[in-house]
Amino acid sequence: MSEEDRAIQERARGFIDEDLIPWEQHAEEHDGEIPEAERAKHHDKAIELGLFAMNMPVELGGTGMTTFQQVLVSEQLGRVTNALGWCVHTPPAWAPAVVSEHQMDTWIKPTIRGEMHECYAITEEGAGSDVDAIEATARRDGDDYVLNGVKMHVTSFNHAAYCFFQAKIVGGEHEGEHAMFFVDVDATGVRVVRTPAYTHTYADHHPLVAFEDVRVPVANLIGDEGDGMAFTYEWFRYERLMIAARCCGAADRLITEATAFAKDRVQFGEPIFAFQAIQHMLADSLTELWAARLMTYELAKNIDRGVDVKLQHAQCSMAKLYASEMAGRVADRAVQIFGGRGYMRENVAERFWREVRVDRIWEGTSEVQRSIIADQLGKRGVSPLIG
Ligand SMILES: Cc1cc2nc3c(=O)[nH]c(=O)nc-3n(C[C@H](O)[C@H](O)[C@H](O)COP(=O)(O)OP(=O)(O)OC[C@H]3O[C@@H](n4cnc5c(N)ncnc54)[C@H](O)[C@@H]3O)c2cc1C
């Protein structure tokens, strides 16, 4: 780590410890909500500390961090529960290279400035892992497109000003190809179908959203007809890496808290830390965290070095797969070490135990990651993938 890397890491760590972690329990007890003034304070401080839009170039108003520096920040964000870390926002990294000037000024720059928030409407009832199965449609009509479809798990829709809507083109030479659009959430024809409850307790909801004859100007199409899937793949790579980083942060916090508890908690006249069964759970957890962290850091540095995108794709899958499964095991052991207290919602291990579960599902399930890794192994062999 350079001096600058360390300074960024310390800035993020201080923010999480002093400003965010103290609100976890309140959020848990209030459906993920914290007082509005406090939420605004977190948002402003994230900007003031230079952590906001860390993946965006400086010339667009972002912080322009290296991928490795972004991983260091994301790792710290992973140490807090209840999605309080989502006050640090990263607009889609692929956007600056492909959006028009109009789209940049209308949606991306205000997002970088923290004035508006986006969400992603890709998954559908019949299209989860198999994104190509989406049934949402986009039909050209004069200077507009008419959009239809029902999207599922649209994270942060309740806080968003606009969404990225993925659909298949109907008619014309790109019939059946994927396209991506900017759609304002208050556009006519956009409707929340329902807001289901999820395992975690987050202020950001994941509703089903219907798009019924939503008319958007051609200027809302991102790139060209047929480009939609490429943006989604790029987003997957970025998010898989950042999920790996957040899982490392979660495991770090869990091991730290469980170790402190084990040293303090006395049963049979001794701190439970003295019992080999407890020591082994902590030792396994620390060892697995180290492996996941090394993998995640190395991948981030590989991306900064500009390694081949196919290699990045496979390594992002490996890091996400390993780190998310590692975090699940560590959270489960932490609950066990805390005993009955670990089953209480006021306990950090209980919250993480529920929260890290989704990291094995979203942005590609563990099964899908394994398929990607095996596919690359079959095509390229061992050395090109892991050096
Ligand atoms: C909390 C949450 C937030 C989300 N946020 C968003 C969002 O903001 N925007 C959005 O568009 N989507 C979002 N998603 C959707 C998420 O990306 C999908 O849930 C995920 O891709 C899996 O799809 P699925 O749930 O339909 O599962 P399915 O694809 O139906 O999979 C079910 C099971 O079958 C397995 N399976 C599927 N295909 C294969 C295969 N080829 N080989 C082996 N096993 C397979 C899966 O691994 C899984 O175990 C979110 C999901 C959750 C839970």
Image (cartoon, grey):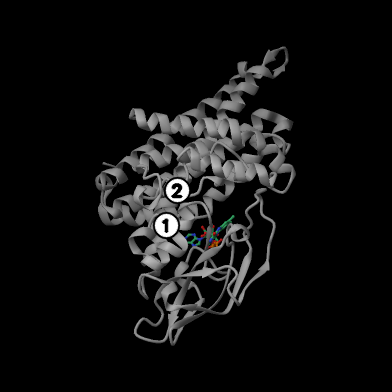
Pick the front one: 145 or 282: 145
**Which residue does the image show at 44% across and 72% down from the upper left?**
220
First along the sequence among labels 2 and 1: 2
**Which residue does the image show at 70% across and 30% down from the upper left?**
339
Determine crowd level at label 1: few under 14, some 14-19, many 20+ residues with C-alpha closer than 10 A.
some
Pick the front one: 49 or 130: 49
Mark 1: secondary structure: helix
Using the image, determine if residue 192 lies above or below residue 241: below
Q: Position of residue 52 (x, y in %)?
A: 47, 45
Label 1, ligand 1: CB separation under 8 Å:
no
Determine crowd level at label 2: few under 14, some 14-19, many 20+ residues with C-alpha closer than 10 A.
many
Q: Position of residue 169 (x, y in %)?
A: 43, 80
- For residue 168, what is the image quadrant? bottom left
Q: CA distance from mark 2 to mark 1?
A: 15 Å
Please tell me how many numbered marks the rendered image carries. Answer: 2
Label 2, ligand 1: CB separation under 8 Å:
no
From the viewer's perspective, tell me whether residue 34 is left or right of residue 117: right
- For residue 40, what is the image quadrant? top right
Task: Say which amino acid is labelled 1.
Answer: Trp
Pick the front one: 247 or 374: 247
Task: Say which amino acid is labelled 2.
Answer: Ala
**Which residue does the image show at 56% across and 45% down from the upper left?**
43
Q: Give me the disc on residue 235.
A: 1
- For residue 193, what is the image quadrant? bottom right
Can you identify the residue that label 2 sits on? 53
Residue farthest top in this picture: 269
Is residue 68 visible in the rendered structure shown here? yes
Mark 2 vs mark 1: in front = 2
